[in-house]
Amino acid sequence: MNMTSDFLSEGLVRELMSDKLHVLEYENRDLLGRSAAHTVADIMRRTIDEKGRVRMVFASAMSQTDFLKYLGEEPDIDWTKVYAFHLDDYKEFPPDHEQSFSRFLIDRLFNRVEGVNFFPINSQASDPEDECRRYSSLLKEAPIDIMILGIGESGHLAFIDPSYCDFNDPAIFKTSQLDKETFEQLVHDGCFETVDEVPKSAYTMTVSACLSGLFTIIIVPTALKAKSIKAVVEGPITTQVPASILQKKGNAWLLIDKDSGQLLSK
């Protein structure tokens, strides 16, 4: 499936490649979100037509809000045939907490559509290892058709921060600790008022699992991400920038805006 032509041309500033990774820069985050939603919806419809269902993994972050808004407005998607998972969530966190990642997706998308099959992480599981096995099993039942990712200020993927990054990790889903830079990002995003309020550990898909999608769309707006985008697109592949491994991912499209792409070579 040739995807490039399926992205919206409105507001598209430039396209470039970083090894196998397609990079599309848009004028602003609104146009980025519209284009991502348009393309993801198209893949969803075609996958449902071909397979009878579509399996998706969603990122939960403020960078995703425009995309989720517009995806919920896309017509002719049979959400009863959508099987949705999420990348990560805070460990030991109430699912109804306003900063819960499952609630983030429910509030911004799943409550706006009818019949979606959503499989949330049980962040309050009494046995974290058992929860990792349960969620790993769900993810492995069949291929993930569409993987939606973000990239953190430290270049992290999901909740795999540089200090804990292992490109060869055989696990699919695990618990992990968070780095100081991630604490700070969550404060920048307005999720918490101070770093002391940020949970120190999380459930997360591993880097290898993040690379498993048949189609991967990475959504990264705002100037706060400019440094990490520079490192991901133009730097070496290194565990110090976990998302740099995306350079080796085929069928992957990184969507940025002019603010997040401002440090890239012109």
Image: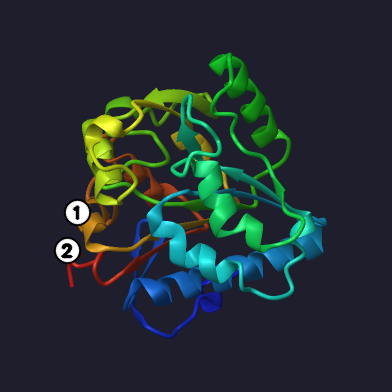
Dot 1 falls on a residue whose secondary structure is helix
On the image, the x and y values in percent for residue 14 come to 32, 77
Q: Which of the image's four quarters has the C terminus? A: bottom left
Residue 9 visible (yes or no): yes
Q: Total of numbered circles in the picture?
A: 2
In-image side of 4 versus 13 (left or right): right
The reply to whether callout 2 and callout 1 are in contact (CB within 8 Å) is yes
Label 1: few (<14), some or many (≥20) within 10 Å? some
Q: Is residue 119 above or below residue 12?
A: above
Q: Which of the image's four quarters has the N terminus? A: bottom right
In the rendering, which numbered label is found on residue 5?
A: none
On the image, the x and y values in percent for residue 123 come to 54, 28
Q: CA distance from mark 2 to mark 1?
A: 7 Å
Residue at x 49% of width, y 65% of height: 67
Q: Nearer the viewer, residue 36 or 195?
A: 195
The type of residue carrying mark 1 is Lys
Residue extending farthest bottom: 10
Residue on which disc 2 sits: 263
Residue extending farthest right: 52
In-image side of 228 versus 84 (left or right): left
Residue at x 30% of width, y 44% of height: 186
On the image, the x and y values in percent for residue 98 come to 46, 44
Residue on which disc 1 sits: 227
